[in-house]
Image (spheres, helix red, strand yellow):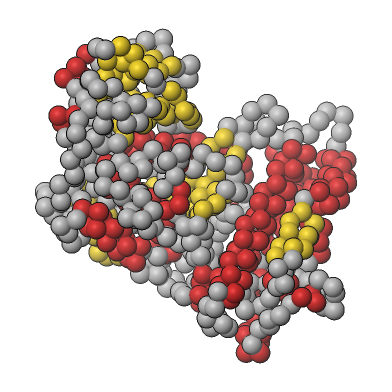
């Protein structure tokens, strides 16, 4: 990193904690640094996160004080952009010490003064005081923190979100403020659904670092009108409390109750929103970028795994389900739906609008302010009116710049579908647990569009949206061999063969793989029943009416009538719900979720 400039974005709330020797650390403007906990105590572990726009490859870390060197270990690195390195100092020295990230020359340096813990002062106004600002450095730290938090294999899940935030191996900001805010007994309880999840993570990070945060009050739109927002509520507008943890917890609950699935589907050109649209480019699709699908589901990007020789690239995201499950999922047509015709609002990839102080109040930047801003040069309207085909073709080129071998791409689709089925296994079991534990039974079924979006037990345990995405995913996999024939230029077809021959080879592999990939679901009597991928595809029509949690799991997985598999079924739909299911079946059969 020869010649780079470095600015250290200090996370300390008390200037006395920064050692007097900080000026000895060579500084510039390209690396942001986060140190946790907020007040370092001698003998306690210290976590340091470095984040940069430029690669941080081939670096090493060192730490030491006037008393000598101390142990410092790189525990993970990733990106990017942003590129990042996470460092652990197992035991802070008694004296002032420095943590240096070193390449060909010093890349970044942080000087730290251990002190005695004192509680964070209660906010004079709002849920927490604003002590830092959003800029490229803090945005990069946010992205890096998210990537490290969810640096786990695809398919990993927690229920609810606070389970991962309470994991010291995952959360670099765990108990950062020294008030036991992430302890199971006394800490935050964070149980967001898909709409709340991005807001909750952004607000959590902002609270820990003293950054501004806010959310808009939006309606849900109408038949010919996108959702729009009117009010804006920030952390400074929230009620204060004598206990800082209580104030933050109350505000986070207020955020969860104030946002909904339409909050992210506002018009791309609209300024009075919480998100702005970003370009479909690799450097714009960073951890923390959200994806709003046209039907109300929201995901948040957490990691980009670049394409390598023999291995396809992968874009990973997290989402939350109504039952509180938070899971890591890959980008593909089965998880990300993109349609711009005949839907309410405008879907796509979007980023949180920066919240800034202006005249003593907090507000969000407008599109006109964001577009030329050196820290936020990702604003773009290219997704507006984009066709589904063009969108996914563009994303395929971003994730895999080199055309994929058709066999590898086909295998990747099978893996993605298998992961999707495994998450459904868990979702169906959550519904069964509700009934076994004496929950409301039968669960009332809403009518019309509310089947996809309501509140209460139906929202928590039914799976209409999940099953719609599953059926679309199955169609995508079925179509893939034909897609190779239609668009051979999108793939790396071996010389000496033809697209038609590749299709035949893929169909042969399909028979093999459909027996290889399997799931097990829990039947009504507690026994496990195994299904192959071939079984699942044979039951596609039955899955069109498998989303009602009042049905037994055997029915929800499409068990044939009068089979041994169905013999353990002990629960059936009320007749009125059965009639509604038949009435709505065409939506699932046609893979066409009504938008109004």
- Seen at 84% across and 40% down, the residue is 502
In the displayed structure, 201 sits above or below 526; it is above
Q: Is residue 169 above or below residue 221?
A: above
Q: Nearer the viewer, residue 116 or 381?
A: 116
Task: Work out whether residue 29 can be spotted.
Answer: no
Which residue is rendered at x = 61% and y = 36% of the image?
A: 313
Please tell me whether residue 245 is drawn above or below residue 401 in the rendered image: below
- Give residue 175's quadrant in the image: top left
Residue at position x 39%, y 53% in the image: 184
Q: Position of 403 compared to 306: left or right?
A: right
- Give left or right: position of 328 versus 225: right
Residue furthest toward the bottom? 575
Residue 321: where, in percent of width, then height? 51, 61
Residue 409 visible to the viewer = yes
* Residue 525 drawn at (x, y percent): 72, 72
Residue 61 in the image: state x and y as whole percent.
40, 18
Quadrant position of the N terminus in the picture: top left
Position above or below: 328 against 114? below
Q: Position of residue 127 (x, y in %)?
A: 21, 55
Q: Residue at x 81, y 71 (%)?
A: 565
Q: How many marks?
A: 0
Residue in the foreground of this view, choosing between 521 and 344: 521
């Amino acid at each position: 990193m020869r010649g780079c400039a470095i600015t250290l974005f200090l996370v300390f709330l008390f200037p006395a904690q920064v050692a007097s020797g900080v000026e000895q650390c060579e500084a510039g403007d390209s690396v942001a640094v986060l140190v946790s906990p907020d007040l370092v105590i001698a003998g306690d572990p210290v976590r340091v996160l470095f984040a940069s726009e430029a690669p941080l490859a081939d670096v090493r870390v060192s730490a030491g004080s006037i008393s000598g060197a101390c142990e410092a270990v790189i525990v993970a690195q990733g990106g990017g952009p942003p590129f990042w390195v996470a460092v652990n100092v197992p035991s802070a020295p008694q004296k002032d010490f420095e943590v240096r990230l070193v390449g060909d020359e010093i890349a970044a340096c942080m000087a730290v003064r251990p002190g005695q813990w004192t509680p964070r002062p209660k906010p004079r106004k709002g849920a927490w005081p604003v002590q830092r600002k959003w800029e490229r450095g803090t945005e990069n730290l946010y992205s890096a923190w998210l990537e490290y938090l969810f640096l786990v294999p695809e398919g990993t899940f927690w229920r609810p979100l606070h389970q991962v935030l309470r994991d010291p191996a995952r959360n670099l900001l765990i108990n950062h403020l020294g008030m036991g805010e992430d302890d199971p007994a006394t800490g935050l309880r964070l149980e967001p659904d898909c709409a709340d999840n991005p807001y909750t993570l952004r607000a959590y990070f902002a609270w820990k670092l003293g950054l501004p945060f806010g959310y808009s009050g939006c309606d849900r739109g109408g038949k010919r009108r996108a959702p729009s927002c009117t009010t804006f509520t920030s952390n400074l507008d929230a009620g204060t409390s004598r206990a800082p943890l209580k104030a933050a917890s109350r505000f986070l609950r207020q955020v969860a109750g104030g946002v909904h699935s339409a909050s992210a589907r506002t018009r791309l050109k609209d300024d009075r929103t919480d998100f702005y649209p970003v370009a479909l480019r690799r450097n714009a699709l960073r951890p923390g970028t959200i994806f709003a699908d046209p039907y109300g589901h929201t995901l948040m990007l957490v990691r980009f795994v670049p394409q390598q020789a023999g291995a396809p690239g992968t874009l990973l995201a997290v989402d939350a389900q109504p039952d509180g499950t938070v899971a890591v999922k890959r980008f593909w047509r089965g998880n990300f739906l993109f349609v711009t015709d005949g839907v309410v609002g405008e879907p796509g990839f979007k980023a949180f609008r920066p919240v800034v102080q202006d005249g003593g109040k907090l507000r969000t930047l407008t599109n006109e302010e964001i577009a030329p801003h050196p820290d936020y040069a990702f604003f773009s309207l290219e997704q507006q009116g984009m066709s589904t085909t063009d969108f996914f073709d563009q994303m395929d080129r971003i994730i895999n710049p080199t055309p994929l071998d058709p066999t590898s791409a086909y295998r990747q689709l099978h893996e993605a579908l298998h992961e999707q089925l495994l998450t459904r296994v868990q979702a169906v079991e959550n519904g069964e647990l509700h009934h076994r534990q004496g929950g409301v039974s039968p669960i009332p079924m809403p009518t019309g569009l509310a089947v996809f979006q309501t509140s209460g037990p139906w929202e928590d345990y039914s799976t209409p949206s999940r099953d719609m995405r599953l059926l679309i995913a199955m169609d995508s996999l079925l179509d893939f061999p034909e897609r190779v024939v239609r668009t051979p230029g999108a793939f790396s077809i071996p010389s000496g063969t033809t697209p038609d021959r590749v299709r035949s080879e893929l169909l042969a592999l399909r028979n093999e793989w459909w027996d290889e990939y399997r799931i097990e679901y829990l039947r009504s009597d507690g026994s496990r029943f195994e299904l192959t991928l071939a079984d699942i595809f044979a039951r596609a029509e039955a899955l069109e009416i498998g989303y009602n949690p009042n049905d037994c799991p055997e029915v929800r997985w499409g068990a044939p009538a009068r089979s041994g598999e169905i013999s353990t079924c002990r629960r059936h739909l009320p007749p009125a719900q059965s009639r509604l299911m038949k009435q709505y079946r065409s939506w699932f059969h046609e893979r066409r979720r009504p938008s109004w």
